[in-house]
Image: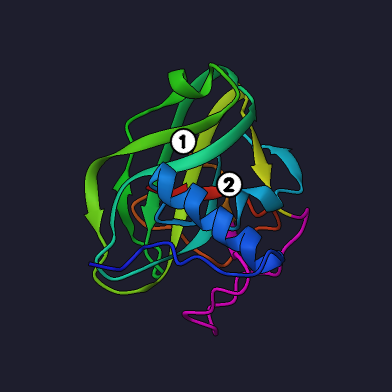
Amino acid sequence: MPQRSYTPQTDVGPARQADLDDIARIGYGILAESFPLAAAAGTTILATGGLYLVGIPLLDGDKVSGIVSSVSVVASVQTTLFCGLYNDSGVLLGTSADVKTDFGTGAVNKVAPLASTVSITRSGIYYAAICSVATTPPTMVRGTATIPALDKTLPGSFALPRAAFMTGQTTLPATATFTNAGSIGLWMAAV
């Protein structure tokens, strides 16, 4: 089982803020996130039928029971909304039920429980995913407007979140392709 604990620092500078961020993540049960939520730089409305994938670092032994995303404007007239987790080969490891009702009420952090817990057996980058089909999909919290393209040549590099995007989806496909690099890094997390 991976060790996730808080180790206090004695300084009061940026490292101290990192400690406070660690406390918040542990308190909410977040195992990993695409970037610290406090570093969010804006919002973006999801494209209907778009599958958004964003890299998150997970450790061997982590048990992922849900995907968290931050909704700033709720969706309306939704057909479906699914969240899930993919491995670095694009294989779907776990998916939520259709959570359109929850994403249509209250603009807050939303947890989409996975149908069954995913046990991580190898440390590395995994991909939190969201797909919405709606007249007006939800508006989600994101990082900077653009991020570097997905770079599969740097496995295990956690320096920057990597994102991918697929169009024409109504649910989470069994296999995702990472050839179409996304430019929007949504804030997503695994719990």
Give the residue type at disc 1.
Thr
In percent of width and height, residue 155 lies at 48, 81
Looking at the image, which residue is at 60% across and 23% down?
A: 107
Asked which secondary structure carries label 2, the reply is loop
Q: Dot 1: what SS?
A: loop
Q: What residue do we see at 54% from left, 83% from top?
A: 154
- Asked whether 125 falls inside the magenta stretch, the response is no
Q: Is residue 181 visible?
A: no
Q: Quadrant of the N terminus?
A: bottom left
Q: Of the numbered discs in the image, which one, if any, rests on residue 167?
A: 2
| Mark 1 nearby-residue class (10 Å; few <14, some 14–19, many ≥20) | some
Image coords of residue 44 (percent x, y):
72, 39
Range drawn in magenta = 144-164
Is residue 62 or residue 77 the one in the foreground? 62
User: Tag on residue 180?
Assistant: none
Magenta: main secondary structure? loop
- Judged left or right of residue 81, residue 18 is right
What kind of residue is marked 2?
A: Thr
Instruction: Report the Cα–Cα distance between label 1 and label 2.
Output: 9 Å
Location of residue 27 in the rendering, given as x and y in whole percent from the top left corner: 42, 45
Q: Is residue 161 above or below residue 93?
A: below
Q: Which residue is mark 1?
A: 170
The residue located at (53%, 48%) in the rendering is 188
Image coordinates of residue 48 in percent, x first then y, are: 60, 33
Q: Quadrant of residue 50?
A: top right
User: As drawn, is 36 to the left or to the right of 83?
Assistant: right
